[in-house]
Amino acid sequence: MPDQTDSLNPDTMMDAVTLRVGDLEAMSGYYSGALALTPLEERAYGREVHRVLGRGATPMVKLVHTPDLPGVDPRQAGLYHTAFLFDDAPSLAATVYRAAQTPRSRFVGSSDHLVSEAFYFTDPEGNGIELYSDRPRSQWAWTNGQIQMATEYLDPNAYLQRHLTQDVLDAAPALAGRVGHVHLQVGDVALARAFYVDALGFESTATGYPGALFASAGGYHHHVAMNTWHSAGAGPRAASLGLGDVAISVPTREDLDALIARLTARGVPFADDGRAVRVSDPWGTQVTVAASGTTADDLLA
């Protein structure tokens, strides 16, 4: 057993989020049209069909067809939103425009968070989506180990007028994108901290928002966020559509071994198949931590 470390590797990143969906074709069509994702791999497991979509070779979402499950209860623990990160303002603008033009999208709002600029949508089955790009890290401000973020008005029309061109719109499917962070609904912030910070090894980056905690690896503003805004007191999740898995990528097998040491020390049960460690948070949300290099085929294994 390697020496136990308290934190995830600084090069930790988020990976494709798994969503359980009631209508696979409609949801696949939505993510292809609104976010310019393309199907990468597909596999059937009995009645369940698993389909991975992304940009280039980068998986961004896995859709699992589970039509017999009930819809999401917005008061239970689970997904608040999946945040898709784009390299620059034109790439973000192109995706925002596509999402806004898709009839099944519901635009929720836009915000300047100081560290990033973000636009929010809801997909046809009620899953939250954030589309964002980061400001340079040199412009981020930290005070006593806390990242300075805010929720300031961002005019969506002015943003598109400033950054959108026909060339970048046409090129959207070829532009880079990935999951930048995942924001979760939980029943209790202190319990979420014990799992996501103390056990998984993320570092707390912002605690000043009432009912919320932000955490990351490597000095990022946040890879995960947990809030109780709609779910305070929620217990274990019932089986439903919506979030199926939160995926995290670490650089090496040694990082997985360090994670196992943290989980073991805290009595947190887990499964290790040699490539990835799977563990459930206190509300039953599955978290998969895998060594880097995850492909669409790996997500279907």
Image: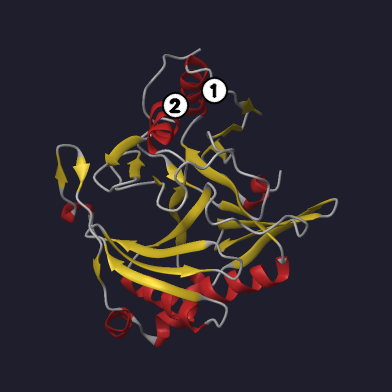
Instruction: List x then y, in percent, for residue 6.
Output: 36, 23
Q: Is residue 206 left or right of residue 130?
A: left
For the residue pair 238 and 299, the one nearer the viewer reads as 238
Label at residue 268: 1
Residue under the image location 73 percent in, 55 percent down: 69
- Is residue 114 positioned above or below 30 on the image? above
Q: Is residue 70 left or right of residue 228?
A: right
- Element on which disc 2 rests: helix
Q: Is residue 163 left or right of residue 290?
A: left
The quarter of the picture where residue 115 lies is bottom left
Residue under the image location 56 percent in, 83 percent down: 103
**Residue type at the position of mark 2:** Ala
Which quadrant of the rendered structure holds the C terminus? top right
Instruction: List x then y, in percent, for residue 162.
Output: 27, 82
- Is residue 64 positioned above or below 105 on the image? above
**Residue type at the position of mark 1:** Val
Number of dots carrying numbers: 2
Q: Are marks 2 and 1 in contact (CB under 8 Å)?
A: yes
Q: Single out the residue that lies furthest toward the front.
A: 233
For the residue pair 291 and 65, the one nearer the viewer reads as 65
Mark 2 is surrounded, within 10 Å at the Cα level, by few (under 14), some (14 to 19) or many (20 or more) other residues, namely many
Q: Is residue 275 left or right of residue 282?
A: right
- Element on which disc 1 rests: loop
Label at residue 191: none
- Is residue 148 positioned above or below 193 on the image? below
Residue under the image location 37 percent in, 76 percent down: 93
The quarter of the picture where residue 84 lies is bottom left
Q: Considering only order in the chain, which callout, 1 or 2, is on the residue closer to the N terminus?
A: 2
Instruction: List x then y, in percent, for residue 74.
Output: 54, 57
Q: Single out the residue that lies furthest toward the right.
A: 46
Q: Which residue is mark 2?
A: 199
